[in-house]
Amino acid sequence: MNLNNFALAAVFLALVGCSANNQVSTTSNQHLSQQQAFERTIRPIDSNGNSSASATTLTVRMSAYRVPAVSITVFDNNQIIWSKGYGKADIKLDRNTTSNTLFQAASISKAVTSVGAFKMIEHGDFALDEDVNLKLKRWQVPDNQFTQHQKVTPSRIMSHTSGLNVSGFEGYNTAQTTPSVVEILQGSELSNSPAVRVFQTPGASEHYSGGGMTVLQLLMEDTSRQAFASLMEQLILQPLDMSQSAFELHLPERRQSQIAKGYNSQGKMIAGGYHLYPEKAAAGLWSTPKDLAKFMLALGKAYRGEDEALLSQESAKTMLTRVPGAGGTGIGIDGKADAFRFRHSGGNAGYTCYAVSFADSGRGFVVMTNSDNGFQLIHEISRAMSETYNWPAMWMRE
């Protein structure tokens, strides 16, 4: 290449580089502008579901509901476009919320667990529609008049049609001795929830059951011969680089300063800062909106056949297909056509959260709060997101 040609090539590459930088800058500015617009356009929603004509700021609405901390991640075009924390993770210590602040994911744990179960099903560890008692070793679902002809299966557990009882768990104070999974299922003296039993014919109708997910937790441990936290680290958290997430009952000391302390409906901190949930599959995940967004994006890609590293398209489609009389298998589904979306909400003592993604495009958001009062605020946040980004409604059944 002669000097003239070299100079022309250098000029061309410089122009291309400037153009690319300008595009990145323009996109970044657009995302920041949309984020700021969202923060200023939160409209109160009344008891009839109607939005106020007057918009206010997110921080004003947080104060109105006495929600100390909110953390949000928004994603579009299969990319996370922004993450931000608002308010106080710990009021007493005056600790600010960041995008790396840890919250309890509560029942969103069920969706993450269900994908882990589907990965084990793909591996042949157990079958989607087989009787769980065929593989359970340390405890068995007691047979009764309801199980004579229909059995509890992984599919029915994940779609909440298993016929099992115990809808949710209250958790344990950090100073308490926590029961084992088997003791929880048996309903031992250490457990603060009833024994898990079949109370209606499996497959007959939907009944939300955290007890069922605890049976699934035991099944996954018994068939893998691994502790649940390390199993889920191997199946989901490490492959998706969810480095701020864990199913550990006790987080290590290095992570204690990252925790958003939970607050009750009166604005008082939960005793000990949070409850412990040995029912890990149902309620035990610690995470951030950014990590959960990675999970939602990966599940969406699998569903669309864009990337099957997490899960096969067949499995993802099974999860996002409505079970008669219920929702999806392992995750909630709403809407039709362009508005078709998968989602899960969660509520533990002192925490509420919500994750949603449109199934046919990699867009949606995750929000986590450290308050029992979070759900109404999350509803208002969801509507503001739809308004800001001109997306279809994203709240449950809205």
Image: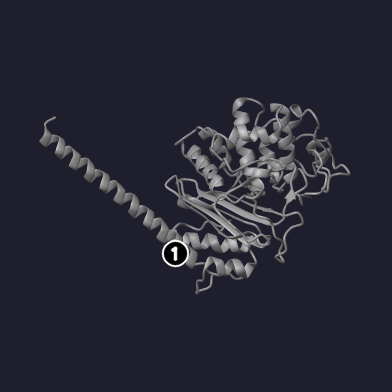
Dot 1: within a 10 Å radius of its alpha carbon, few (fewer than 14), some, or many (20 or more) residues?
A: some
- Kindly identify which residue carries mark 1: 37
Which residue sits at x=46%, y=36%?
A: 305
Residue 131 x %, y %: 73, 31
- The answer to whether 307 appears left or right of 155 in the picture is left
Is residue 385 toward the left or the right of residue 17 in the image? right
Q: Is residue 150 left or right of residue 232?
A: right
Is residue 168 among the parts visible in the rendering?
no
Question: Visible in this render: residue 135?
Answer: yes
- State the residue in front, 365 or 132: 365
Task: Determine the residue positioned at 48% across, 59% down.
Answer: 386
Picture quarter containing residue 3? top left
Residue 122: image location, x then y, percent:
59, 28
The total of numbered circles placed on residues is: 1
Q: Quadrant of residue 136?
A: top right
Mark 1 is on which residue type?
Answer: Ala
Q: Is residue 144 left or right of residue 26?
A: right
Callout 1: SS: helix
130 and 4: which is toward the camera: 4
Looking at the picture, how far across and down is residue 396, in whole percent?
58, 56
The residue closer to the viewer here, 278 or 329, is: 278
Q: Quadrant of the image for the C terminus?
A: bottom right
At 66% from the left and 37% from the top, the residue drawn is 155
Position in image of residue 180 (x %, y %): 80, 38
Quadrant containing the N terminus is: top left
